[in-house]
Structure formats: structure tokens, C-alpha cells
Image (spheres, rainbow, N blue to C red):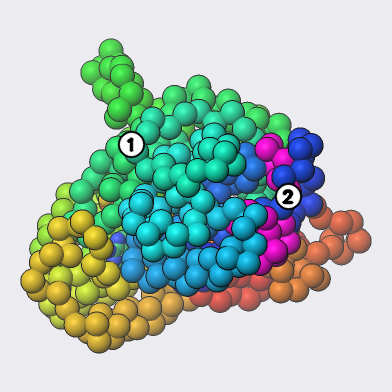
Amino acid sequence: MAENVGMTATETSLHSMAIPAAGAATGRGSYWITTFGCQMNKADSERMAGILEAMGYSAGSDEHSADLVLYNTCTIRDNAEQKVYSYLGRQAQRKRDNPHLTLVVAGCVAQQEGEALLRRVPELDLVMGPQHANRLETLLIQVESGQQVVATGEHHILEDITTARRDSAVCAWVNVIYGCNERCTYCVVPAVRGREQSRLPEAIRLEMEGLAAQGFREITLLGQNIDAYGRDLPGITPEGRRAHTLTDLLQHVHDVKGLERIRFATSHPRYFTDRLIDACADLPKVCEHFHIPFQSGDDDVLRAMARGYTVERYRRIIERIRRRMPDASISADVIVGFPGETDAQYRRTLTLIEEIGFDLVNTAAYSPRPNTPAATWPDQLEEAVKVARLQELNALVEQVARQRSGRYLGRVEAVLVEGVNPKNDQQLMGRTRSNRLTFFPAQQADGTPIAAGDSVAVRIEAVRPFSLSGSLA
Ligand code: SAH
Ligand code: SF4
Ligand code: F3S
């Protein structure tokens, strides 16, 4: 899909940016990070880049000449994992010619494969799971002393004291809960990200205040199952509720000065509460965009996935959101070709997509993953069936998104400016509160320049399924 909301696997590279490397005193050479996978990984990469720069590495401009190459990997589906091996093959070759190259595999493939990765690619210096991201410096010091290091043990995630090197100067991610305690039968995330660990509200607020002071305007709070936030923290209110929930967190951080927008992802329908919906409607900075994966439109498939809700419950959540916020945009993730999925069950997924009218759906064909229950079930579908369903599904998703985009035509939308359109330097780009990517001319009619971080009013003149364009109003 064109955009990337929620935890969908995509790939990005962190390359040279205008921000000078802070504390680049010791001159350890250049680094390159390629990030695969979801926003969790992107947030981890930004923190690891910050650590590297504090150690004296500077951002390199080329993957094939950098002194340290770090792949932050994803294993959500087999194709995500295979991509890493092809990248590693080229770097291993380079390392044989240049022993000074430091090769690091971080993230979810590292966690899943551990030492097996060293056997497969003996040139690696460091294999480190996501819970060790904040320990990068300690681990690299071990590497510098001549060891090959594997760090994949269960680890309490320490509060990060290094400043992340953020990819954007306007929008930032803030982790609020790490890990996942769910047991969806198709999913590797609990195995690779470990148990849930919520950060304290004070630490989250402090980070947000720091970001606002640096000029960030939009923050997305992150968790694989963000609705679980706080359930591992102690405390009960006088009314007998858990003291720490996502709703309480939103209320706690909402008044951070300088921030304009707050988002959160990813929501789980099992735990998405009416109280949360009401808080989102009442708190003006919380954007009217909800990423709530439903995975399947069929109750029996949902049960086999161990998702813990029915299609009816999902419908009721969306109804309630739309009652309180009629223009809210809704995005989701869905899997087709789950073991045993019949044609009729698959069609119920299509029906739900039309019925809800999603602004965006991240789609995937089911991929059997190591150490997950569904991978061992006998009723796996043929690849051809999965591919055919995925193609038909994608066409429908695009058609529905196009219809949803149509509602913006002629409207004036508040757009938070993120920067120049990389494909057209005469244009700027930003997002609406509903998270639609929007392009518009780089200058006001009177010649006044517009800067990243400004909020501008754009009259929408052209709509595409996943983006909009218009002129300054
Ligand atoms: N925590 C989020 C999603 C995390 S994984 C949630 O509970 O919804 C991101 C998406 O990848 C999932 O929503 C799912 O649609 C997809 N996914 C996960 N495991 C998969 C698998 N084995 N095969 C295909 N898609 C998968
Ligand atoms: Fe995976 Fe389910 Fe956890 Fe999401 S909630 S990360 S799909 S186990
Ligand atoms: Fe994210 Fe992929 Fe890991 S989706 S949690 S990077 S397996």
C-alpha cells in the first residue's frame, strides 16, 4: 500500500540528514542503517543512530562504503526475512575484502535466529535482539575488544539516555509499551519482542516535552498492542480501575506545550474501550485517525487466529468512533489465506472492507512463521490461492480508499508541513489530521515561504486513493 500506518513491514534507510552529528569527537568512521519492518523498528533505529553518533560515528552516505553497517530486521513474513539475507550476502563479501567493516544485525530476525545467524553469516560482528537496542554502545565495545557478540536474552528495557537521531524534524515516535502478551496463532511478534513492558507516564511525558522543545509538532505513541498500555504497571484507582491505561496516558500528556497533534498505534479491537473513544473525541490534539487491524471478516477465522473478538464487536467499535467523530479515518491490517480459510470466509473479509469503508488497509497473504501454532496446521492453502485472494483484495482496498478520498474534494484541510515532496521540489508535503498525505505548492501566493512544522490550510483539488493535492487556501 502507498502509505505506512501501523506495524506494516516496509523498508527505509536512514541516510545523511542536515542535523550535524552531536558529539562526533572520537571519529570512529561512518555508519549506515537500513531499517526493515514496522514503526517499532524505525523508532529503535533512530535511537541506535543516536547512540552511534554519541560514540563518534557519523552518518554515511553510502551503504557500500560505510565503516559500520547495521540492518534492523523484520521477520513478520518470510519475504521480509529473506530480503535481509540477500542484503547480508553483499556485505559479507565486502567484509572479506575489508576486515575493518563492522557488521550488525539487529531487530526481529536477529532475535529469532540468534546464533544460527552467525553460522549462516560468519562475517557478522554483532547479532542483537530488539530489547537490546539501547545497549548498542556496550555491545559494540565488546565487538571492539575482538568478540563476536550475540545479545538475544530476555532483557528489561532501560530508559534511553541517548538522544535519538530522528528521521523527521516535525513528527516523532515515542514508545509507550514494548512487547506483546497476545498469542495470535500466526504471529512471531511475542516471540521476538518479548513480554509487555510499559514505560512510566512521567518518562513518556518528559520525552514528549523534550521533543516539543526541539520543535516537534506531532507525536505518535507506539506499541504493538497499545491498548495494553499500563496493564503491567501497579496501581488501582478509588473506582477500582487500573490506574494506568492508554486513556489515562493520553490525558496525562495531552497538554504538553508546543505539540499540535497526538496519534497512537497499533490498537487491538479486544481492548479498545468506549472510554478511549470518548477521550479521543474530547481531547483536541488527538487526531481523528484510528489504526485498528481486524485481520479477518469471519468469526471462525478470528477464533482460529485467537484474536479474542467478533466481527460484530469490531463493527460496534467503528460505529461508536463515527458517532463521536463522524469524519474519523479508519485504517486496518488484514490477512488472507489463513490456514483453512474458505472462499466464503474470505468473501466476508471483502464485505467488511466495503461495509466499513476503510481509508487504508495494509494487506498480507498468510505466511507460516517459525514457532507459531498456525504454521503447523495441516490445512495450509496453496500459494496460488493466497496470491489470487491478495490481488483481488488489494483492488478492492484501492477502490474503497479512492471513494474515501473523494470526500476531501473541495474541502479545506489543516495540513502539518513535513517537508519537500522528494519527487517534486516545487511542492511541499504534509498530512491531514486524518493522516492523508497531501501535496501543495511550496510558497504562499504573496511569496511568503512555508517551513516544515507550519500548519497550513490547503484546499483539496485532486484526490487519489492514498494521497491528496491542492493549493493554499
Ligand atoms: N500488533 C498488531 C500487528 C502487528 S504485525 C496487531 O495486533 O494487529 C503487523 C501485521 O502483519 C498484522 O496486523 C498482520 O496483519 C500481519 N501479519 C502478522 N503475522 C503475519 C503472518 N504470519 N502472515 C501474514 N501477515 C502477518
Ligand atoms: Fe502479533 Fe497479535 Fe501481538 Fe499483534 S496482538 S503483535 S498480531 S500477537
Ligand atoms: Fe515489527 Fe517486523 Fe518485528 S513488523 S515487531 S519489525 S517482526
In the rendering, which numbered label is found on residue 62?
none
**Mark 2 — residue?**
29
- Front residue of 47 and 358: 47
Q: Percent position (x, y) of residue 57?
A: 71, 45
Q: Which residue is rendered at x = 70% and y = 64% of the image?
A: 65
- Residue type highlighted by circle 2: Gly
Q: Nearer the viewer, residue 199 or 406?
A: 199
Q: Is residue 262 visible?
A: no
Q: Are marks 2 and 1 in contact (CB under 8 Å)?
A: no
Residue 221 position (above or below residue 452): above
**Residue bounds of the magenta highlight:** 53-69
Count up the numbered dots: 2
Q: Position of residue 344 (x, y in %)?
A: 14, 78
Residue 42, how many percent across, how many down?
53, 52
* Residue 2 lies in the magenta-colored region: no
**The C terminus sits in image quarter:** bottom right
Q: Badge 1 is on which residue? A: 154
Specify which label sits upstream in the sequence, 2 or 1: 2
Residue 153 locus on image (x, y percent): 34, 38
Q: Is residue 82 visible?
A: yes
Q: What type is the residue that disc 1 sits on?
A: Glu
